[in-house]
Image (spheres, rainbow, N blue to C red):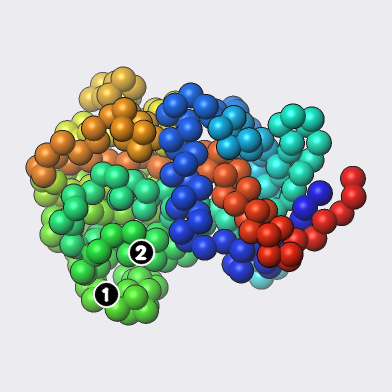
Amino acid sequence: MVIVPEGMIADMLTRKSAFDAVENVFAAMAAGDAYNFPVVREAIGHEDALYGFKGGFDRAGGVLGLKAGGYWPHNLERRGLINHQSTVFLFDPDSGRVKAMVGGNLLTALRTAAASSVSIRHLARKDARVLGMIGAGHQATFQLRAALETHGFEKVIGWNYHPEMLSNLASVAEEMDVPFEAVDLPDMIRADAIITITSSFAPTLLAEHVSPGTHIACMGTDTTGKQEVSADLLAGATVFADEVAQSVSIGEAQHAIKDGLLADTDIHQLGSVINSAHPGRISDEQITVFDGTGVGLQDLAVAASIVDAAVSSGQATVVPI
């Protein structure tokens, strides 16, 4: 059994390897070669924690496993630990024997950022130059770095509920030699692509904030009731998702579906664009949306990439089972 602890992940996982792993598994999902298992999520009645499992099987990649973990809201204040904690377990699909245990915290942040950047690669206009960021928390910095590495953006504009946190985005933009400007929400109309990464339960980005031809990656909505963009904005766009079933039930599309503005048949898998089964963007005026809810197969694909890197570099801890 290969063990790659959390402290080694930063040395093992590049943003490019995360991008490649997520892109490949999205394509496998759309081709019917990979599928996610039902998600388990429970309030455990201790420390106000939510704990659960995401798993799946990628036949094309030979990856089987699960991510176990959740949200401990008091970790930071009481223990100096991040509130989200997770670990990925991989199994041999031929025998069922355990293959690896991989720290899942940084992995989760990088695979989430990779998903939005995959959507930008395949759905944003090629001439997109201004990136809009809504949200400026810890995950937003990963989103911004991945997007700037994926596409030739020349400027970043940002908005956050707490403006003082925009310095997080400004620091990343400065590090990557791209100018940053704090703006009001209506100014998002200047953006060619927008990433929303908040925990909002009410729409922040409205239809009047978005210009024709914009691509929007909605990355914060992953629970019933959450909402980052208005339902009518989704209804007027071409919508893609990592997994349609999750988009409809816990993703950004849940509200447009509930209001009768969108049907599940109106939502397309991003992997079908990667596979060239769907044309994706067909005009410079089209608004496209990626509803990124986060699926277990993303975690497994990135974990498998980490294990391969750890083994090939000789840095993996291997224990007998």
The quadrant in which residue 166 appears is bottom left
Q: Mark number for residue 149?
A: 2
Q: Which residue is drawn at 54% across and 29% down?
A: 34
For residue 197, say whether it is visible: yes
| Nearer the observer, 314 or 243 | 314
The quadrant in which residue 266 appears is top left
Q: Which residue is drawn at 27% across and 41% down?
A: 289
Q: Residue furthest front?
A: 312
SS state under label 2: helix
| Nearer the observer, 73 or 85 | 85
* Location of residue 43 in the rendering, given as x and y in whole percent from the top left corner: 65, 40
Count residues near mark 2 (Cα–Cα under 10 Å), then give few for <14, some for 14-19, many for 20+.
few
The residue that disc 1 covers is 178
Q: What type is the residue that disc 1 sits on?
A: Val
* Location of residue 57 in the rendering, given as x and y in whole percent from the top left corner: 61, 31
Q: What type is the residue that disc 2 sits on?
A: Glu
